[in-house]
Amino acid sequence: MREKVYQYTHQRLLNGNPPTIREVQKAVGLKAAESARAHLEALVEEGRLVKRSTRSRSYALPPDQQSSGGRIPILGQVQAGALTTAVQDIEGYVESKHANSDHQFFALKVRGLSMRDAGILPNDLVIVRQQAAALPGDIVVALVEDDATVKRLKFASNRVILQAENPDFADIEVRPEELNLLGKVVEVRRYYEPLGSAGL
């Protein structure tokens, strides 16, 4: 049973979709969530998984198992809304044609609805090309101090505008020296079923 727990969790992590304990329980046919937790904790003790925090989706692959191959890393979440602290833990990898590019790429899961009208919704995965500059109108991942957000880049006189694509959200204005661009969004992916799920 523990091997089934490991194989299911391992595949979900490789796909960049960490499972909850209850999802593990249901996937492998355990009667109680606590049984799934016990197996996951045992896998941590064996060094086959690592635990990053006490939150529900806290299990991750050890660094030596995070071989990317034709994949790019998923680095936590980014807010499409008000600024929120950036998350940089690697949650898994996603297959991408960009992996073999000369540029560096990473992926982020989106939270919030401020980019709704640009077709970027909560739980979407944005593929980002790392670059320190972008053109007006580009959709970017921007870091202001320790906070990250995904927005459309605009300029006005001596201000940088991180423009929302939803009238319910205010734009964010900063001074140029306050802005650090992490990269430009080059692709958006949406999954209608959690990655790694078994289906019906």
Image: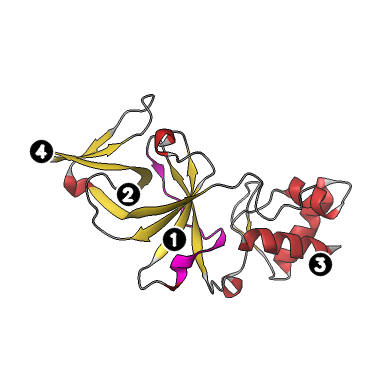
Distance between the Cα atoms at labels 4 and 2?
20 Å
Q: Secondary structure at mark 1?
A: strand
Residue at x-position 52% and y-position 45%: 124
Q: How many marks?
A: 4
Residue at mark 1? 106
Q: Measure the C-alpha gap from mark 4 to mark 1.
A: 31 Å
The amino acid type of the residue labelled 4 equals Ser
Q: Between disc 3 and disc 4, whose residue precedes?
A: 3
Where residue 106 sits, quadrant-wise, is bottom left
- Which residue: 80% across, 52% down? 27
Q: Earlier in the sequence, mark 1 or mark 2?
A: 1
Q: Nearer the viewer, mark 1 or mark 3?
A: 1
Relative to 82, 7 lies left or right: right
The residue that disc 2 covers is: 143
Q: Which residues are magenta?
A: 83-99
Q: Which residue is mark 4?
A: 157
Q: Quadrant of the N terminus?
A: bottom right
Image coords of residue 108 (percent x, y): 47, 52
Q: Nearer the viewer, residue 26 or 136?
A: 136
| Mark before the other along the chain sequence, 3 or 2 | 3
Q: Earlier in the sequence, mark 4 or mark 1?
A: 1
Q: Is residue 87 magenta?
A: yes
Tell whether position 180 is magenta. no
- Name the element at disc 2: strand
Q: Which secondary structure lies at badge 3?
A: helix
Q: Which mark is residue 3?
A: 3
Residue 133 located left or right of residue 195: left
State how far apart marks 1 and 3 are (Cα).
30 Å
Residue type, numbered disc 1: Phe
Q: Residue furthest top?
A: 168
